[in-house]
Amino acid sequence: MPVKTDSRLVQIRTAQHPLLREFRQVLRGERKPGAQSPERILLEGPRLIAEALRDGRQLEAVLFTPSGLAQQGAGLLPQLSKHVAVAQAPENLFALAADAETPSGVVALARPPETSPEKFWAPAEGLYLVTAGLQDPGNLGTLARAAEAFGAAGLARIGPGVGLWHPKTLRASAGSLLRLPARDYASPEAWMEEAQARGLQCIAAVPRHGRPPEEIRWQGRVALLIGSEAHGLPRPLLRASAEQVIIPMQPAVESLNAGVAGAILLYAAARARAARP
Amino acid sequence: MPVKTDSRLVQIRTAQHPLLREFRQVLRGERKPGAQSPERILLEGPRLIAEALRDGRQLEAVLFTPSGLAQQGAGLLPQLSKHVAVAQAPENLFALAADAETPSGVVALARPPETSPEKFWAPAEGLYLVTAGLQDPGNLGTLARAAEAFGAAGLARIGPGVGLWHPKTLRASAGSLLRLPARDYASPEAWMEEAQARGLQCIAAVPRHGRPPEEIRWQGRVALLIGSEAHGLPRPLLRASAEQVIIPMQPAVESLNAGVAGAILLYAAARARAARP
């Protein structure tokens, strides 16, 4: 006989409730700059939660507002295994567990996807995206979404900077970070040690003095390297790059946003690889 | 003898001060959906204000917080003509006149750039960007920035939706909207009447069932049409389009953000036009 979902709905009435404290802890942890490999990630909104379920990701807890439960409960509850804690909290307590400016009335905790080096480097001819020092979660999420869209084999995030599992990063990725193999590295050196052993060709995105995308050899096992919004790529990564690529543009515009620029270069890489595999 | 700037510094001490009310009025007006051709626009932050001054745009008023004045005053005040009202308000009153989440302590009022139809359509072979119904100011601003970066002749914004002069649109454009010829149209019909008389070839960005950018003829007087985040392009604009363009991507990704997708297509158009003028 199926478990009746209503029977296990936990009512949260104080900010000290252990389940609410768990949500808050995860929210705080993910907001810390440089946070790495958290034990749990926060999924905000019905769309991200639905994507996680579709990908077979195991949820640990789901928290609704009363109106969130009314709107999303019928769709979500039947998909949850009986091991998932399901709770409801009034708007003001729910707000403590959510990062979004316009909360949609449902958040969930899940284990983050984990990608071993073996799985990450399995594609022999993969295109990789590498970000170093990005500060803005919107940019990192945008890049993850573009990387998946353009067939990247994986995303390597080099710290410091905003984390892969910051709630805003996840949201901006529109779920791509739940699917795209992604790994976290504390420093350029940690990443280079792994990458260079695998014969990866690095292509550094630079603001000037590089070659346009159509003159770059994008075939084979290559990585596109995107640096931080304010400072660009750290020196060791520039030195390790065989090529430097620019986006040709009008001189009145100093630069494009890092997320947009990276997405354009991933697009250019994908088209070049499709034209001459 | 030069006017001593300190002597004309107006001290704002109440929310009812006429100058502060003017700032608030502009801020409110620009946030109204569908607001068109305002008499004044709000420039937030030293960067946007510096860009406006560099472009020779006349400011009408500048408002500082005490710390904003201490940090930016020395750089900005000498550039202002004596007709510009300069005021200072404490943080809590200044906040009423600013939209930014992290206010930088200085905002200004200016006349918006105006582009006549004659000036807008002057380039015989221009690439135009047309947006219809966009809701998100970040997307509209991102597109304006990309349009300028990739040499577009102009930007036509078709309502309803977020306005060209919404403070967040202007900020996301990083000043491009102060330079790029831009015109506002209330409806697809209003725009089509002007565009069709000029023999413009329309290329509609669609999520599927279109041709990849490299199969599109981007040369000559052409327009790239970008629809709203939720509903895409309105039917009359789709019907008016000679071509439909897609961005080829992996099926797991439903779509890209409208600003990113438009920027990629503008890049592709610019590269095609540069390769075969």
Image: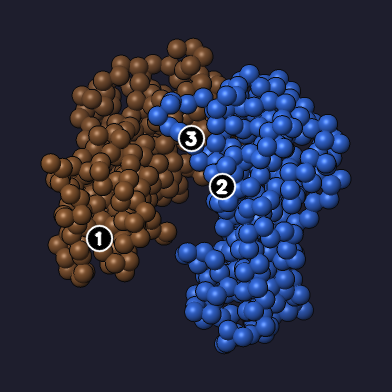
Chain colours: A blue, B brown
Q: Chain of mark 1?
A: B
In the rendered image, the vertical position of residue B33 relative to residue A262, given as above or below: below
Residue A67 x, y percent position in the rendering: 49, 75
Residue B270 x, y percent position in the rendering: 47, 23
Label ID, residue A255 = 3
- Residue displayed at 72% across by 55% down: A55
Q: Quadrant of the C terminus of chain B?
A: top left
Residue A274 found in image quarter? top right
Q: Label 2 to label 1, Cα distance in Å?
A: 35 Å
Out of B166 and B121, give the one closest to the viewer. B166
Q: Chain of mark 3?
A: A
Q: Quadrant of the N terminus of chain B?
A: top left
Out of A13 and B108, give the one closest to the viewer. B108
The residue carrying mark 2 is A139
Q: Amino acid at mark 2?
A: Asn
Label 3 or label 2, whichever lies nearer to me, is: 3
